[in-house]
Amino acid sequence: MTDDKPQTAVCPGSYDPVTNGHLDIIGRASRTFERVVVGVVNNPMRKSKTLFTAEERKAFIEDATKDVDNIEVKIFSNLVVEFAREAGASAIVKGLRAISDFEYENEMAQLNHRLDPGVESLYVFAHSNYSFLSSTGVKEMAIFNADISDLVPAPVAAALADRLGRS
């Protein structure tokens, strides 16, 4: 353990599917924290049904981050603050793309702080290459067979093509 890096953070999300924007935030967190636990939400509250199972989403992230030693991926089904506590995390790290993200995340940060003031919510601005990128947008592009090769890892692009019946 080093004294110059905070110890553990969680990066929660539905990751349906994981995008290069998500991976950028996760990577930046891994350079800031000694340990990063990527939390894959089992049944997201804001989405009716996911395209990929939690196990598939977890596997995509594990594959994309396999060369980074301080990242682990877990599926969770409880409140983010509880998941952070279970992981021994002092912070929840999420990315912000637009004002709409800020409004939602501000509300979540307030609620999380109320539940556990010892777990900080930290936000990282999306890199300009990814500020427009969302899982929903990627899925919509994939439905119409658009090139998404620079937006998601190759295994994700292949799985999207397969799942959506495209070549």
Image (tube, rainbow, N blue to C red):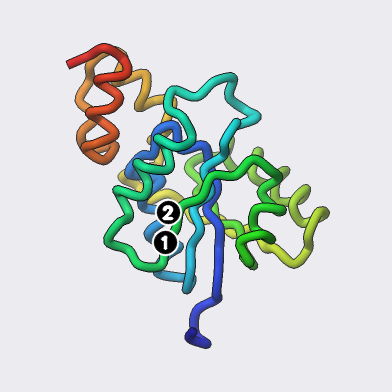
The label number, if any, that marks residue 71 in the structure image: 1
Read off the residue under disc 2.
25
Foreground residue among 99 and 34 = 34
Q: Which mark is residue 127?
A: none
Residue under the image location 30 percent in, 56 percent down: 66
Judged by depth in the image, the label closer to the viewer, 2 or 1, is: 1
Side of 11 relative to 86 (left or right): left
> How many other residues sit within 10 Å of disc 1, few (<14), some (14-19) or many (≥20)?
many
Q: Is residue 131 left or right of residue 118?
A: left
Question: Image height check: is 147 above or below 6?
Answer: above
- Above or below — where is 1 with respect to 65? below
Q: Nearer the viewer, residue 67 or 142?
A: 67
Disc 2 residue type?
Ile
Query: Residue 80: horizontal and vertical position, in percent?
Result: 66, 48
Q: Quadrant of the C terminus?
A: top left
Outermost residue toward the front in this view:
55
Among numbered discs 2 and 1, the one appearing first in the sequence: 2
Q: Which of the 4 image quadrants contains residue 21?
A: top left
- Choose between 36 and 5: the one closer to the eye: 36
Circle 2/circle 1 CB separation < 8 Å: no
Q: Does residue 155 appear to the left or right of 78 in the view shown?
A: left
Residue, x 78% and y 63% (percent of image)? Answer: 117
Q: Nearer the viewer, residue 101 or 28?
A: 28
